[in-house]
Image: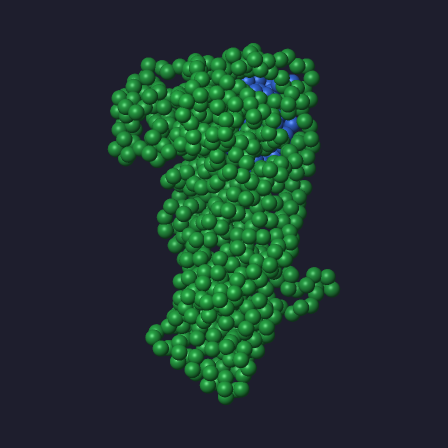
Amino acid sequence: MGGIRGLKNRIALIGNPNSGKSSLFNHLTGLRQKTGNFPGVTVERRSGAMRLPDGSEIQVVDFPGTYSLYPTSLDERVVFDVLSNPNSADYPDLVIYVADALRLDQHLLLLSQIRDLGLPVILALNLVDAADASGVQYDTHGLKEKLGLPTIEVNGRTGEGVGLLLQQVEHVFDGNWEVTTQPVKFTITPALNTTIQEIRSLLPWVTHDFQALILAHHADELTYLKPAEVAQIKSISVKNGFHSLRIQVDEIMERFRTIDQIIAESRKPNEQSGRNNLTSRIDQLVTHIFWGPVIFVCFLLFIFQAVFSWSTLPMEWIERIFSELGGGVKYALGEGWLSSLLADGILAGLGGVLVFIPQIVLLFLLVAILEESGYMARAVYLFDRLLRKVGLNGRSIVALVSGTACAIPAVMSTRTITNQKERLITILVTPFISCSARLPVYAVLVGLMVPAGKLVGLISYQALTFMGLYILGAAAAMGGAWVFNRVLKTDETGYLMMELPDYQVPHWRNVVFTVWSKVASFVREAGKIIILISIVLWFLASYSLPGRMDQAEATARTEAQARSLSETDTKALIASKQIETSFAGLLGKGLEPVIRPLGFDWKIGIALVTSFAAREVFVGTMATIYSIGSVDDELSIRQRMAAEINPANGRSRYSLPVALSLLLFYVFAMQCMSTIAVVRKETGSWKWPMVQLGFMTGMAYVVSLITFQGLTAMGY
Amino acid sequence: MTNKPLTLAQVAPGSRVRIIRVDDHASAGRLLAMGLRPGQCVTLVRRTVFGAAYYISGEYQQYGIRRDEAAILWVEYVD
């Protein structure tokens, strides 16, 4: 390693799950970090600039936590994919390996594998003081000697030792790297050696035997190999009778034999074992067969309450800011297509994304706290069985809970599910969970349909209906999963196998960084698509065949004069006539024959088209169609809708059958362009989002049809 | 205490056992790497409804594993 360093140098941060790696990353980079994906896969890649004592900056990449180079989940595969490929853009010049001092034996396994790939490594020994408190002490000097690599004691929670670590990194980049022998070896048998040498002569860039072995184990999964190379490696393996599973087990066992010896020699004898019993006492309750689920439901109710009530004010502020901005743009630019595009298309679209931020921040904050504290792992453990019954996985619980805020981040959270089928089913059914965007639609329709009274003077009927809609959504998710589980076939086994980490008080730094990176990625990923679709929908709602819009305006003015309407009402009437004439209106009318059996007219048809961008657009569209000036006025929309008469039978247009049919349609229908985009991205093809769209819309259609036709036949 | 070979899936909650070997199985690599490996002593603390998932306590950490994952770990009782 030469003396040159800078941002083109890469440091990889690697370690087991729960090793404190991410805390250390936050300390190393501070706010100079960004989130993205590893090339070619949808695995989150956190990177940041790390400043060395001499002022120079080096790029550091936080890799997903993994136990070994023989992992089970998509996330973890990135580690061997990058580390076995010196041509990868993320291939590190130096690895900082984070190990928890308390479980050093277990954490040395991956370290020994990484060293066999020929990578220079600095060991960051984390939480030495915590291990100390639990009665585990090391002769650190002896340990360093035995491991033969620079070792720095750090504390990921407080940041202690980070300065020393940075000095050590600088030292290494200054060219002070002695190649030392790796003590934890495994024996390459003659049979294995044939396979390895044949792979090495096939691919000359392979410089280490262990690298060739990794290729033999994972040929199918490595993203950088050409199909021809994969086939050749596989034929070498078959020819030499390479039994991947047995070789993995033998290798791990052999490595642990040496590791256990090193640990035994460097661990100081200690009589007192002060193991923290708090965790086991909390778990007596939290993982209890009865109280465990009860506690989970309590947490869930608290999350609902927080996400829905605490976010109201900031959401109103954001809406106001964007409506003021839109007004400002229109005032500054005057009437015209440009100001309309900016105000009604782009700013409205941007506002549509940003308005969800308070809810998303709150949800991620609470979920991050539950994860950081160690609780989420218990929820996974508790519900694994129930969820597995319908083809999901305990880990799906995180996605299902997140789905109550927004399906987009929820779908992104499925990456930790190792089994591809379970992951796919989780992605497919998560949008059934009632997200926050359905709320405004529910609010309008429930208000229209359900009387304001209270059951036994306590719980309002409307609140009960809301709860019913949420339960219905969750039931649809379970039912959908059950169906997909029957249809999809796989040979892959699912796993639970997870650590239940000790409980800890969440560290604010980690929570803040997690929330920040997830919110930023939501705005980036979903924002682009939502703005794009908003522009398309703006065009559909603002334009029509040549001359038709002017004609609609003239008709509206004549009508307004005849009814001697005020200036505001005239404008609203014009907007109403124009949206009826627009391409969106034409689409709505074209849709009418299809949706009439559900009790919907062309006006609802328009709202269905525009709310495909995002469900809450339904309310705004209804406001425009019913020529109501203010979009925020749910009450007046409700009143106008309630007063609407169905010309066919002279009764209210939004009778109980229609309102309920529409409500149920929104419970089940996909109606979200952004989710489709995220599912496309996460599953890597258009097949699954289309299946999902078909499944959900089909289900919504059938349920609405049965509801409307049934209630009508019953005389409602 | 019998010396009949048995797996972790067969012991009663509260039992303290030593892992003696692991079957060649797709889950083996991960269980070993997580620290559930021969020579280690663990306690089966409790199970979820219908004995579907096992709460295992090791020397310095706890694990949640499924019954079929516990079934590849062969164990013996320790006092």
Kindly tell me whether residue A567 is visible in this rendering.
yes
- Residue B69's x, y, as percent? 51, 31
Viewer-closest of A420 and A369: A369
Image height of A565 relative to A428, above or below: below
Image height of A84 relative to A689, above or below: above
Residue for point 55% across, 31% down: A24
Residue for point 58% across, 52% down: A358
Colour green, chain: A
Kindly tell me whether residue A715 is visible in this rendering.
no
Viewer-closest of A648 and A82: A82
Chain B's shade in the image? blue
Location of the C terminus of chain A by quadrant is: bottom right
Image height of A225 relative to B6, above or below: below
- Residue A352's x, y, as percent? 51, 59
Position of A462 with respect to A234 (left or right) is: right
- Residue A428's x, y, as percent? 45, 50
- Residue A450's x, y, as percent? 62, 68
Residue for point 53% across, 19% down: A151
| Residue B39: quadrant of the picture | top right
